[in-house]
Image: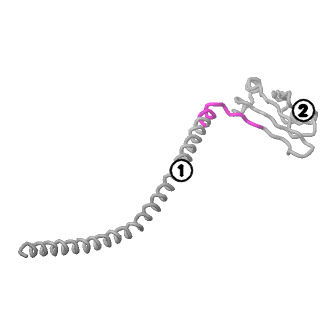
Amino acid sequence: MDSVVPLAAAVGVLGHLCWIGIRRGGMGAAGLNRLRGALVPLRERLESESEALRDLRCRSEQAQERLTAAEQRIQQMERQIAALEKAPPVFIHTRGDPGTNRRPFRAEVSFDATAARAAGRPVSPVWRYGNRLVIHTIDMTAARREADHLFPEKGGYKTYFHASALH
């Protein structure tokens, strides 16, 4: 019996320790379940914020692409402006109104400035550059008549109608 008491005490202590372990394990499992329950909303929030971040990145990339395209258009326009600034101006003289039975006839107009200066008449600086004439009339004969009325040959003007206007 001497050996039974310590053995019974040892079994009792072991049982008690098991009971404490099970109890703590159950409490730990309950705590773990609570932690898992607390993590579910955090995971959902993380997923929704990740989706929002992806959406913002996509919109940012699209905005960057639009900005790049706009910058390229601006550069192209700046090149065109620079080219236009270098080119001399062209003056367009129009006569008549477009209508259903009227066609546009185009011509180049030049002025003999040296003869005008020799005669002592002032010369407009417009005639240093290209001058074009657009006349809206029924036919070429009326266009030539109108051009001769506006820019008479006796006044030192010369009018050259384009070949495409003859068709």
Residue 31 position, x and y percent, is 31, 71
Q: What kind of residue is marked 2?
A: Arg
Residue assigned mark 1: 63
**Please, which colouring scheme is shown?**
one colour
Q: Is the residue 158 above or below the residue 29 in the image?
A: above
Residue 113 position, x and y percent, is 74, 26
Instruction: Classify residue 40 as left or right of residue 122.
Output: left
Residue assigned mark 2: 144
Instruction: Classify residue 152 as left or right of residue 29.
Output: right
**Quarter location, residue 46:** bottom left
At 18% from the left and 75% from the top, the residue drawn is 16
Mark with earlier residue (2, 1): 1
Picture disc at residue 128: none
Q: Report helix, strand or loop for mark 2.
A: helix
At 25% from the left and 74% from the top, the residue drawn is 23
**Quarter location, residue 83:** top right
Q: What kind of residue is marked 1?
A: Ala
Residue sitting nearer the eye, 59 or 89: 59
Residue 59 position, x and y percent, is 53, 53
Instruction: Classify residue 127 as left or right of residue 32.
Output: right
Magenta segment: does it hold 85? yes
Q: Which residue lies furthest to the left in this view?
A: 2
**Quarter location, residue 107:** top right
Which quarter of the rendering shows the C terminus? Answer: top right
Label 2 to label 1: alpha-carbon separation: 56 Å
Residue sitting nearer the eye, 118 or 156: 156
Residue 88 position, x and y percent, is 66, 31
Where does the magenta region start and end?
81-92
Q: Is the residue 58 above or below the residue 125 in the image?
A: below
Residue 117 shows in this picture: yes
Residue sitting nearer the eye, 2 or 143: 2
Q: Report helix, strand or loop for mark 1.
A: helix
